[in-house]
Image (cartoon, grey):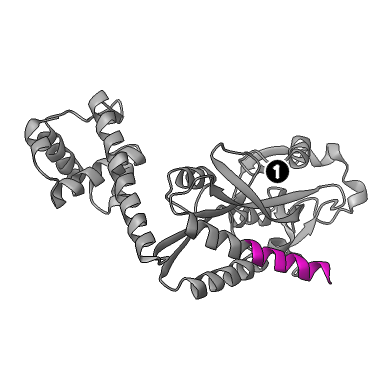
């Protein structure tokens, strides 16, 4: 690293260039970083050239062979992560001094939320905002792998997600479990045939949808009986495939119910072709902001327990 860089303080422009570099690395290249940064590839290239000039280092290789970090680039990227962690820790310590729960509370989910789950989480968020009105709630849907990475990197506080695989460094608290059924659309050849005619060999002769992730053992056994030629993790995209009449696929009752009522869907052998769809509230074992995590997790689990209690009394 150039001696002139090391002798002076970081300017706002330096920090901007470092942010661009970090985003490019995390996105895997210039093209993928365009959307994240909101600037064009040519501007990203100018920023990267400026950073390399100011550092006196070659940070990455880019060209026909794709994007890759040099040894120096990896070292600078690691230093940026350390700088970011120090900045976040500084903000956290200030918040502790002020004894206020402020800043962002980042909640993530991996699946489309049905109406019961939306009401459940809405109650929890209402409780959170009542207890900590200075918090700014950020709630979004992301793919599983991105959620796991965000939790491990302290970029999210609590996530609602399946627990089919367990990641070291994360803890899992049961949120809810609901049955998920094999569905058939009205345009499908099997729609009008009774369940008594639908044996396993017959079902295996039709295309079906795989969720694209490793699910629980009961679900895996059922999928192994089917001819899974399509993939769709999110329920809304899976629903479209099923309604097309080209595929069989699994949906939870809360998603399927309106289409069952309208006659656009039916369940296939629901006593046999169903498995438990289990969701968990997941957090980092040692989060940077434990007070926020505890507040959110307590509210979410209390709302889940209240919902379970109502169901038990029905």
Q: Quadrant of the C terminus?
A: bottom right
Answer left or right for 299 relative to 146. Answer: right
Question: Between residues 83 and 161, which one lies in front from this camera angle?
Answer: 83
- Magenta segment's dominant SS is helix
Q: Secondary structure at mark 1?
A: strand
Looking at the picture, does residue 127 appear above or below residue 250?
below
Question: Between residues 179 and 245, which one lies in front from this camera angle?
Answer: 179
Mark 1 surroundings: few (<14), some (14-19) or many (≥20) residues within 10 A:
many
Please tell me which residue is depicted at 35% across the width and 55% down the height of the picture: 93
Please tell me which residue is depicted at 35% across the width and 66% down the height of the picture: 98
Q: Quadrant of the N terminus?
A: top left
Question: Between residues 57 and 292, which one lies in front from this camera angle?
Answer: 292
Q: Position of residue 266 (x, y in %)?
A: 79, 59
Looking at the picture, does residue 160 appear above or below residue 80?
below
Residue 303 sits inside the magenta stretch: yes
Label 1, on which residue?
208
Q: Position of residue 244 (x, y in %)?
A: 65, 54
Residue sitting at the far front: 97
Please tell me which residue is depicted at 51% across the width and 72% down the height of the picture: 131
The segment highlighted magenta reads 301-313
Quarter residue 138 falls in: bottom left
Please tell me which residue is depicted at 70% across the width and 51% down the height of the picture: 278
């Amino acid at each position: 690293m150039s001696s002139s860089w090391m002798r002076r303080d970081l300017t706002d422009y330096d920090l901007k260039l470092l942010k661009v570099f970090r985003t490019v690395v995390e996105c895997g290249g210039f093209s993928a970083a365009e959307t994240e940064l909101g600037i064009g590839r040519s501007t990203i290239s100018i920023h990267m050239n400026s950073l390399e000039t100011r550092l006196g280092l070659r940070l990455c290789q880019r060209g026909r062979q794709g994007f890759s970090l040099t040894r120096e680039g990896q070292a600078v990227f690691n230093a940026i992560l350390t700088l970011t962690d120090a900045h976040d820790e500084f903000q956290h310590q200030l918040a502790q001094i002020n004894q206020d729960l402020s800043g962002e509370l980042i909640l993530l989910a991996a699946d489309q939320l049905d109406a019961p789950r939306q009401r459940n989480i809405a109650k929890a968020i209402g409780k959170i905002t009542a207890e900590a009105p200075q918090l700014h709630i950020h709630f979004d849907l992301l793919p599983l792998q991105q959620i796991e990475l965000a939790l491990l990197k302290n970029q999210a506080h609590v996530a609602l997600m399946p627990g089919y695989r367990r990641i070291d460094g994360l803890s899992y608290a049961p949120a809810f479990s609901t049955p998920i059924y094999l569905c058939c659309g009205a345009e499908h050849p099997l729609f009008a045939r009774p369940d008594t005619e639908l044996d396993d060999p017959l079902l295996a002769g039709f295309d079906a949808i795989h969720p694209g992730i490793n699910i629980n053992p009961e679900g895996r056994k059922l999928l192994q009986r089917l001819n899974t030629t399509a993939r769709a993790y999110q329920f809304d995209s899976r629903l479209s495939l099923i309604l097309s009449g080209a595929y069989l696929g699994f949906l939870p009752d809360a998603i399927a119910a309106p289409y069952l009522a309208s006659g656009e869907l039916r369940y296939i052998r629901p006593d046999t072709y169903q498995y438990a769809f289990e969701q968990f509230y997941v957090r980092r074992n040692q989060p940077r902001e434990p007070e926020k995590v505890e507040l959110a997790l307590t509210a979410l689990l209390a709302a889940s327990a209240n919902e379970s209690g109502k169901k038990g009394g029905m």
